[in-house]
Image (cartoon, helix red, strand yellow):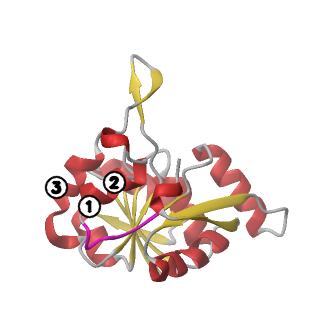
Amino acid sequence: MRVGIVGAGRLGVPLGRLLSMAGHDVFFSDADPARVEAATLAADGQARGGSPLEATRFGDVVIMAVGWEAFPAVVAELGGTLPGKIVIDPSNPIAERDGLSVVVAVPGGLTSPQYQQRVLGADVRLVRTFNTKYPRELLELGTAGQRGGSRADMPYWGDDDEAKKAVLPLIEDAGFTAIDGGGLSDAR
């Protein structure tokens, strides 16, 4: 599958590495070209890279590996490239303040993926997953699962059953056991 990753940082790089090792066609992107270059090198040359717009145009699935607070601005920059796409949201409502992680309140009593769905628009097919493990842990557990070791559970949530079915092999190929958590309202 063709996977565009927006955000070549702490979460995007390990996800891209796992999916690349599994044989998926990965395209890293970031506002910082040096991070894109480092991400493609970390994937042992099995990935390519470019701009976020190129990544969203490239991917059958787009992983939005950007910080919670940056999400709305990044979505706005991507313009009309996301409608109709399956988008994976691995973010959590956490921000960094003075070197510390702090929980950010989700507006309107929504779950965080319900809020992200509103930001993306109704015509984007959102699936929430890859958000329950720390980035380094994600890479270690996924690699172990890919190599025949025990597989950690990876829940996923979404309101679009076809999008969830499309994302399921990515979770499994990344080395995890996919667990259907229900709809976006269930992702608390």
Q: Mark 2 points at which residue?
A: 116
Residue 163 sits in quarter:
bottom left
Which secondary structure, mark 2?
A: helix
In the displayed image of the protein, which residue is found farthest to the front? 109
The x, y position of residue 125, in whole percent, is 36, 72
Q: Mark 1 points at which residue?
A: 120
Q: Name the residue under label 3.
A: 76
Going from N to C along the chain, the mark reached first, 2 or 3, is 3
Packing grade of label 3 (10 A; few <14, some 14-19, many >=20) is few
Amino acid under label 2? Gln
The x, y position of residue 143, in whole percent, is 71, 61
- Mark 2 vs mark 1, CA separation in Å: 6 Å
Residue at the image point whose x is 28% and y is 79% from the top: 84
Residue at the image point whose x is 25% and y is 55% from the top: 119
Residue 85 sits in quarter:
bottom left
Q: In this view, does 74 lie above or below 99?
A: below
